[in-house]
Amino acid sequence: APDVRGREAIFKVHARNKPISPEINFKNLARMTAGFTGADIANLLNEAAILAARAGRKVIIMKDLYEGINKVLMGPQKKSRLVTESDKRITAYHEAGHAILAKLLPHCDPVQEVSIIPRGQAAGYTMTRPENDNSHESKNKWLDYITMALGGRVAEEIVIEDVCTGASGDIKQLTQIAKAMVTEWGMSDLGPIFYGSDHEVFVGRDFGSHSANSEEVQAKIDEQISKIVESCLERARNLLGQHK
Ligand code: ZN
């Protein structure tokens, strides 16, 4: 994937044959699309052009480009999917929980968009986008990320006083991160030791004494994963409680 300067150049090349509003700043667009390939950028500009045409506009405006970015990242909006008022309310609180925490936590990326219109598999989403191409992911950044990922579930607890299955994707993702923090990235009390991942154990690669963890070591790993998630959960509950 190209860096920010590369993306700006690619935007300019693909925009050459398209009517784009003069207010569009390619530098900003390049900044917002970290991780996009050249093909992704071509794709998002095509989507934006289609949206502009559909809306009867002669030029592509920023709103079209935002939607193009979202479509590339998360799939098309599903406005026709039937959503009940009760589901909308739950999704709204769930997403607000993510969004408020992303705003409050210092190491989270800025919130770009929050929606309760289904897109792809998601009932709603809170999209944050990095402001730069930094590739170092720090412990504090991951702790804030896990806390933010718990925000949906915690908002349900606080407002609806019940919890829903919709948080399963968040739970799976944050657990995987907590596990990697402990077993791969040396970010827990167990210290900078590689404990292998399931994948590597299954393929039977030789990682010395760590190729298969003893039950005792596995118990310690599980304890550390719980500790990380529990502390983030407490932080999410405190912050959302204060900012209800
Ligand atoms: Zn969520």
Image (cartoon, rainbow, N blue to C red):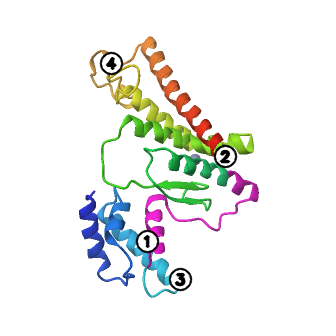
Q: How far across and how far down the image is residue 170, in percent?
A: 54, 42
Of labels 3 and 4, the one closer to you: 3
Between disc 2 and disc 1, the foreground one is: 2
Amino acid on which disc 2 is placed: Lys
**Dot 3 corresponds to which residue?**
55
Residue at which label 4 appears: 210
Secondary element under disc 2, as helix, strand or loop, is loop
Residue that badge 1 annotates: 65
Q: Secondary structure at mark 4?
A: helix
Determine crowd level at label 2: few under 14, some 14-19, many 20+ residues with C-alpha closer than 10 A: few
Image marks 2 and 1: residues in contact by CB distance under 8 Å:
no
Residue at coordinates 56% horizontally, 65% vertically from top-left?
77
Give the residues drawn in magenta, as a range: 61-90
Q: Sequence order check: which comes first, mark 4 or mark 1?
A: 1
Residue 228 drawn at (x, y percent): 49, 28
Amino acid type for the residue under numbered disc 1: Leu
Q: Amino acid at mark 4?
A: His
Secondary structure at numbered mark 3 = loop
